[in-house]
Amino acid sequence: MSFPAYNECKETGMQGLGYIPIHWELKRLKDVASHNDETLGEDTPEEADFLYVDISSVNTQQGIHTKEEVLFKNAPSRARRRVRDGDVMVSTVRTYLKAIARVTEPEENLIVSTGFTVVRPGEQLDPKYAGFLMLSNYFVDEVISRSTGVSYPAINASDLVRIGVTVPPLNEQRAISSFLDTETSKIDGLVSEQRRLIDLLKEKGQAVISHAVTKGLNPNAPMKPSGIQWLGDVPEHWSLKPLKYLATFRSGGTPSKTVPEYWHGDIPWASSKDLKTETLADTIDHITQCALDCDEATLVPAGSVLVVVRGMILLHTFPVVQTLVPMAINQDLKALTPAECIDISYLPWLLRGSTSATFGRIDEAAHGTKVLRMEAWASIHLPVPPIDEQHEIVQAIEKQLETLSQLQTEAERAIELLKERRTALISAAVTGKIDVREFTPVSGEALAAGSSTVVPKVSGKALAAGSSERLTSKVLKS
C-alpha cells in the first residue's frame, strides 16, 4: 500500500527534517511541552511505595518492560523523576538512546531514573503524537548531534527541549497517532511471531541433539532398556557409563586482583560470561605468565569442554563450550577432557544432549546461588556408542543444526527488517513525508506479504522470505 504526499509543503531549513506540510508549524519542544515537572525531594516519606523504572528497563518496541517495587528509602539515588499518564520518557544518555517511551500507566506512584528527561505535552501537543514524534529518526538524530562528552555522551534536558518539533493541527496529530497505533501494532505482532519461531527453532535444535546422542541415527536399530527414567531405551550395542568414567575434571581459580602483575597479559582466562558460543578461542579477561608461574592459575588444553558449575545462569541455561586454544578458567567453571572411549568432538554434544538430566542435579548454595555439585553430576549414567558411530552422529547433528541456523538467521533478519520499517513509518508520518489523513487500515496478512511501500528498501520479497508461515513449515519438515 502506498501513501500520498502532501500537496503543498515548505522548507524548514533544518538538516534532517527538510520540508513539512505548509499548514504545519515547527516549534521548539519547550514551547509545546514542559519537562521534569515533578522531581522527588527530601520531603518524600521514606516508607512511600513506588514502582521504579531504570533506564535499561525501556525500549522503543515494548516501552516500559520492567518495573521494580521499592520503598523510597531503598530506591537508587537516581530514582527521582515522577511520571504521569501521557508523559514521554526520553533517555539523555547516548548509550541508551533507544530508551524512549510514552507512559500509559495508571499508577500514581511511578518514578523513573534521572537519566530520563520526562516530557509532559501541553495543550498544543497530543500525548500519543508526542510519543511517536520522539521515537522518530529525526528527533533521535538531533539528540545525538547535541550530546556532549567523550566517555559517557549525554544531552542536558534544557538542550533536549530546544529541539525543533513538527506540530500539525491537533485533529491531524490524532489521525497520525491512530494510523501509527494501527500499523505499528501489526508490525509488533509480526516481530513477536518471528521471535516465537526462533524459540521453536532452538527447541528443535535441542531435540535433534538429545535424540541423536540417546537414540542414535538408525531408527531400526534394536533397543534395550537403560533402566534410567530420563533416558528410556537405548541402542542395544551401546554401553552405559557414569560421566566420571567418560572424562577427567579440572577446576579453575582466580588470580589475586591485588597483584597487577597477574593481569592484562596474553593468556585467555575464561569465566561464565565467555561461554556464549559453542567454541571458544579467546576470552574477555587475560592473565600473565607470572600468574601461571606463581600457581595462581593453570592451563587446560585445547579441546577441553568447559561447563558452568556455579552461578545464576544455571537457572535457565547449561553452557557447554569447547576450547580451541589452551586457557585458564575461573572457579565457577569445570574443564572436562574426554576419556579414550569418547571422541573429542562428541563429548560436547553428549553433554548438551543430556541437559535435562543435568538440570535435575542442580542444587542451591548460600544466598540462592545455583550450583552443580560434582558428586551428583559425575554419577550420571550416559549412553556411549562406538567411536565410529560417534563420528557419524557428530556429522549428522552439525548438518541438521546448520539448516536450523540458516532458518534462525532468516527470522532474525526478518525482525530487523520489520524494525526498520516500523521506525521509518513513524518518521515518515510525524515529519509530513506521507499524508495519512485518509488512511484505511490494511490487513495483517497484506503487511506480512510486504504490501506497504512506505519504506522502499524493505521489499515485500524480503519480508515474505522471512515470514513465520514459511519458516514454520520448514521447521516442521526438517
Image (cartoon, helix red, strand yellow):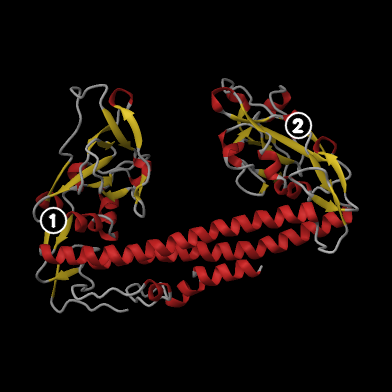
Residue drawn at the location 38% of the way across and 73% of the way down: 447
Specify which label sits upstream in the sequence, 2 or 1.
1
Which label number is shown at residue 250? 2
The reply to whether residue 197 is visible in this rendering is yes
Residue drawn at the location 37% of the way across and 46% of the way down: 65
Amino acid type shown at disc 2: Arg
Image quadrant occupied by the C terminus: bottom right
Amino acid type shown at disc 1: Leu
The reply to whether residue 299 is visible in this rendering is no
* Percent of width and height locating residue 341: 88, 45
* Percent of width and height locating residue 223: 86, 55
How crowded pointer 2 is (Cα within 10 Å; few <14, some 14-19, many 20+) is rated as some
State which mark lies toward you, 2 or 1.
1
How crowded pointer 1 is (Cα within 10 Å; few <14, some 14-19, many 20+) is rated as many
Residue drawn at the location 77% of the way across and 52% of the way down: 213
Give the Cα separation between the discs numbered 2 and 1: 64 Å
The answer to whether residue 268 is above or below residue 147 is above
Residue drawn at the location 71% of the way across and 54% of the way down: 209
- Say which of 335 and 144 sits in front: 335
Q: Is residue 148 left or right of residue 214?
A: left
User: Secondary structure under badge 2?
Assistant: strand
The answer to whether residue 113 is above or below residue 58 is above
Q: Are marks 2 and 1 in contact (CB under 8 Å)?
A: no
Circle 1 sits on which residue? 125
User: Secondary structure under badge 1?
Assistant: loop
